[in-house]
Image (cartoon, rainbow, N blue to C red):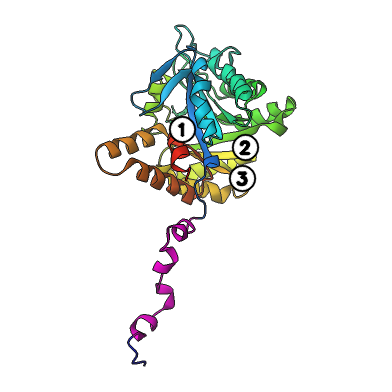
Amino acid sequence: ASTAATSVSISGDIASQLHGGYSHPLARAWQAERQLTKSMLIYPLFVSDNPDDETLIPSLPGQYRRGVNKLVPYLTPLVRKGLKSVILFGVPLAPGSKDALGTNADDPKGPVMSSIRLLRRSFPSLFIVADVCLCEYTTHGHCGILRDDGGLNNALSVDRVSDVAMAYAEAGAHCVAPSDMNDGRIRAIKLKLIEAGIAHKVVLMSYAAKFSGCLYGPFRDAAGSCPSFGDRKCYQLPPGGRGLARRAIQRDINEGADIIMVKPASQYLDIISDAKDIGQNLPVAAYQVSGEFAMIHAGAKAGVFDLKAMAFEATEGILRAGATIVVSYFTPQFLDWLSN
Ligand code: PBG
Ligand code: ZN
């Protein structure tokens, strides 16, 4: 036994000494497998059919519903700051613009298809994702075509959703992202993309593991897509369904998805980690949804934590779980926060 004064600290297990490894801010950053960068972020945009619209969405702090005429002025400074990608959601507001089949989802003059063309022209390096769903365009607010008993008609829904995806891809979307959760839509979209000869230049991002729950409220306010009856439990996953999520992720990979997404994000970090495990050879995206964003704002407003610190902590947790792409309403702020 040594008698030197220093023996106490060095006689133990040397692996117990961790502090030195993360004492410097840079060394702390190096502890992360994946560090947040601007290119990981996709910013959601709500585009309405009223060209000059610029309406604040009260339940989604700082987010607006915008008409096509407002997009370029709004996005120009963001692109200059390093915005790489947006995901478009159409919001038909005009009376009579919704029907049982969601006919206006692929209206060539509608907000989504006009903004795809406009953004491709105006921002050649911006990556355009088009969310594909019917709920914004159906009178009943569900994500497909219904049977007489109110349940989803899966075959008709897949047919329609894949036609809408094709229309967005033909209009120039770099990526189509079906969020409807009808069984078999990834395969149907992939086959139509192949048939049209554009499968080689369109990314197919599946909302593979999308859970039903109460975190989508502000989005439905923004998009006007709240179901007029019932809920989405027969097509969105039950929150406890980890095995079911694994099956959905595997299925969508088998059907030809290029990216798989998990949604919501922070409440489902184990699912993100499963997605990374199952989908080792493809990118995993996570959608930090409207309710998560609103909660962080509410917590900051109540003095529970600092907004920026929490936005980083939540997003870094999502990356740690396995995502390398994050759909985030914080994107404009991150462009500022990440610039030095
Ligand atoms: C449905 C859809 C939802 C979101 C985007 N597309 C969920 C839903 O309404 O069930 C939610 C996104 C968010 O909350 O930010 N097609
Ligand atoms: Zn939907």
Residue under numbered circle 1 = 236
Counting from the top left corner in percent of width and height, residue 95 is at 44, 6
Q: Earlier in the sequence, mark 3 or mark 1?
A: 1
Residue under numbered circle 3 = 282
Instruction: Tell me if mark 1 has few (under 14), some (14-19) or many (20+) residues whose alpha carbon lies within 10 angstroms of its own.
Output: some
Q: Secondary structure at mark 3?
A: loop
- Please check the rendered image and state whether residue 22 is part of the magenta-colored stretch, yes or no: yes
Counting from the top left corner in percent of width and height, residue 142 is at 46, 21
Q: Secondary structure at mark 2?
A: loop
Residue numbers of the magenta segment: 6-32
- Mark 2 to mark 1 CA distance (whole Å): 18 Å
Q: Secondary structure at mark 1?
A: loop
Instruction: Tell me if mark 3 has few (under 14), some (14-19) or many (20+) residues whose alpha carbon lies within 10 angstroms of its own.
Output: some
As shown in the figure, which amino acid type bears the numbered disc 3? Leu
Out of 162 and 29, give the one closest to the viewer: 29
Q: Residue at x 46, y 56 (%)?
A: 29
Task: Examine the image and state in which quarter residue 54 appears.
Answer: top left
